[in-house]
Amino acid sequence: TQLLEQSPQFLSIQEGENLTVYCNSSSVFSSLQWYRQEPGEGPVLLVTVVTGGEVKKLKRLTFQFGDARKDSSLHITAAQPGDTGLYLCAGGGGSNYKLTFGKGTLLTVNP
Amino acid sequence: SAVISQKPSRDICQRGTSLTIQCQVDSQVTMMFWYRQQPGQSLTLIATANQGSEATYESGFVIDKFPISRPNLTFSTLTVSNMSPEDSSIYLCSVDPGGADTQYFGPGTRLTVL
């Protein structure tokens, strides 16, 4: 069984601060997805990384896939209240295209 | 990508009744998934519903409790049967249009069982 450990589970910061969310596993994944979910909505895909060592940037968000494809990180620079939400990582490569989800990081950015 | 709608968006039901949740996609997709999510928590996969085959249920979920239909490539339903308060949750459908392990989610159905 593949497991994804996501940390921290909760994060409350002030506007303008930087933060990093981690997603770790002992298993290798063929890809890793990051989603953000706001209250009352479904998860929205932020990025997919597929190559070990890959780094992708999306405005103030930087995503990295570990060299061994077992871990990933999401770094947010100068967080804004609009970044508030539940961040989920998900590993691909499971049978029947199923994803393995981490437990999520609930981020609150205070103005 | 894909645009997904769900109906109803929310409902309050009495225990012992059943609710059918609809999921509509704006394009034809083979792979569709149904999840359950407690507020503020991660997603738990209920079943995979691929068109042309019977739904495949995850451990802890059974067809009698969560029957699924997949009549075509753009539509699916999930029924929550004989509901109890423990079934109160958010139910989400998702699709993987390209078979690339990238799923797109509907807005969810928030179910409260009294």
Image (spheres, rainbow, N blue to C red):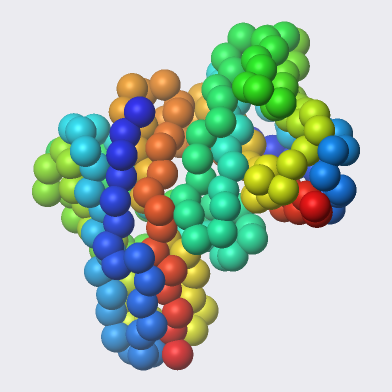
Q: Nearer the viewer, residue B106 or A71?
A: B106
- Quadrant hosting residue A88: top right
**Residue furthest left as drawn:** B71
For the point 25% across and 69% down, the residue is B20
Q: How many numbered tags mark residues here? A: 0
Left or right of residue B32, residue A64 in this image: right
- Quadrant hosting residue B53: top left
Q: Is residue A40 placed above or below A81 in the rendered structure?
A: below
- Quadrant hosting residue B103: top left
Q: Quadrant location of the N terminus of chain B?
A: top left
Can residue A96 be seen by looking at this rendering? Answer: no
Residue A19 in the image: x percent, y percent? 84, 36
For the point 50% across and 40% down, the residue is A44
Q: Is residue A103 placed above or below A35 in the rendered structure?
A: below
Q: Quadrant location of the C terminus of chain B?
A: bottom left
Residue B108 in the image: x percent, y percent? 41, 58
Residue A36 in the image: x percent, y percent? 59, 42
Left or right of residue B84, residue A5 in this image: right
**Residue furthest front as drawn:** A111
Q: Is residue B37 placed above or below A17 in the rendered structure?
A: below
Left or right of residue B11, residue A101 in this image: right
For the point 86% across and 49% down, the residue is A13
Residue B59 in the image: x percent, y percent? 48, 55
For the point 63% across and 22% down, the residue is A58
Can residue B94 be seen by looking at this rendering? Answer: yes
